[in-house]
Amino acid sequence: MAGAALAAELAELEAAPIAEPAEWRKLAIFLVMAVGQFMALLDIQIVVASMSSIQGGLSASLDEIDWIQTSYLMAEIVMIPLSAYLAQALSTRWVFVASAALFTVTSLACGAAWDLRSMMVFRAIQGFVGGAMIPLAFATGFAFFDGQKAAIATAILGVVSTLAPALGPAIGGLITDTLGWRWLFFVNIVPGALVAIALVGLGKFEKAEPRLLLKIDWLHAASLAIFLGGLQYVLEEGPQRQWLADKGVAAMAWAAAVAGVVFLERCFWSPRPLVNIAPFREPGFAIASVLSFVIGFGIFTSVYLTPVYLAGVRDYSSLAIGGTVFVAGASMTLWAGPAAWLAARIDLRIMMAVGLVLYVVSFWMMSGMNADWGFWELFWPQAVRGGAVLFTMVSVVGMALRDMPDEELKDASGFNNLMRNLGGAVGIAAVNTWLIDFARLHADRLVVAMGKGSDAALSALGGLVLRFGEAGVDPSQGRALAAATMLQGVRAQALALAFDDVFRISAWIFAACLLLVPFCNGGPMSHRVRGRHH
């Protein structure tokens, strides 16, 4: 009797009609969601520049502190593909409200964390609940708007998706220097609460199917969590732990591989899969997903590499790094208007091709880097990259989602965002490995060249010995200090050469992607018609 009553109540709830929101309400809902998405994305990178402060505050070791970032990313990447199922069951509105509210609570908990273990738990929950806001904002933009409005919405979310992680380290460094590291998390409280309250006040705009909560395929859920969470762990920890030579990384890789097989089996044969792979029946969506993976590689590696270079080679402070990388964020914002205008009027494949070429140009300019590069040398490569990011982001989202029927938008958006995040995770793991290998190779070559009696090297060494002697340093100690100074210079130069190699490889990867562009879905964003499949 109770089961029948519950089923009848759920059926009545699902049958209740939902009126089409007014245009002003659509815009308000979309902008509120964009703020929520910005918060979730900002928290990916906001702690990067402040790890040493957090480490001291929590009395954690250098090896342990990375888990603050890893736990967040592992949980976030699991939620992204799950968000479509939850939104279908509970409605986008209530999933977003719950995500924003729980993100606010866990931000407060992170700021109040008393040790590393508590921080890891709170960060994992924060990443999990925040992950739902990322794809749902994109899906809602496409569900609400047609034509040029859809292009503008995509451009806004494109700026949010790239600006938040790009500015994260700079904002984090500024907050830590002025207020303390705990405020990295406390700053989320007011905007998070406002997002949740605003969405509740803006009312319903979508039906829910709560009976889906009674049909969850728990094996599918478990395999998804182990597969994506394990893959993220391997990619985060692999470069520092010699990959499969480390027992922990190897065990997680095997667990992720087995879970991946189970996850795919459930996608095809589960009576009600948690993740719907129907969007991949469209070849254009599949190709756009590959491009989204590569774009994620470009966005996250460029955001990661520039601060690493400035800190490791130039010894910049977090504030100086923030001031330098701000150029990329400002450039992205300036390119947003032209990108939206063009997306509504020209073939998205042309925009994608232009964006890929701009990426190639930017990376090739960066491949001329040396140990003396600073703000002005990095200015134009970053300015060009801002255009590359916006052109590729707007076009790839348009090509992936424009022709999707409304009932598949959330799944398609989830996959699109998942592929971008995976591209970033794979990219950072790859460039870390390349940097280590190339720096070692260049250092060996420079040491060998110096050991053969290079006149320039001997002259530089003699000059340093003389300088230390003039400063009153004992001759034997002066020679040791001179040798140590020369070695430090060799390491910096080797690392700079390694960055050049990494940027050259990245340029070739994006050049190769131009071959995929003709096979993508063509036409401008104005061809988007809500609720219809073309």
Image (cartoon, rainbow, N blue to C red):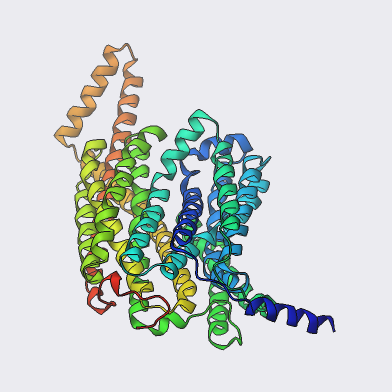
Quadrant location, the N terminus: bottom right
Q: For the view shown, which residue lies furthest in the left direction?
A: 455
Q: Does residue 230 show up?
A: no
Find the residue positioned furthest to the right.
1
Taking the spot 61% from the left edge, 48% from the top edge, the residue there is 104
Near-viewer residue (169 or 107): 107
Q: Is residue 481 visible in this depiction of the protein?
A: yes
Reply above or below: 202 against 271.
above
Residue 371: x and y, percent? 25, 38
- The correct choice, above or below, for 319 with respect to 151 in the image is above
Viewer-closest of 61 and 340? 340
> Which residue is drawn at the image coordinates 31% and 17% (left, top)?
475
* Image quarter of residue 54: top right
Please give left or right for residue 388 compared with residue 103 in the image.
left
Q: Quadrant of residue 373?
A: top left
Please tell me which residue lies in front, 320 or 186: 186
- Rendered location of residue 310, percent (x, y): 33, 39
Residue 459 on image: x %, y %: 17, 28
Location of the C terminus (image quadrant): bottom left
Q: Is residue 474 above or below residue 442?
A: above
Residue 489: % across, % down: 29, 35
Closer-to-camera residue (333/285): 333
Please state the total of marks drawn on the protein image.
Answer: 0
Say whether residue 276 is left or right of residue 4. left
Residue occupying the point 56% across, 58% down: 202
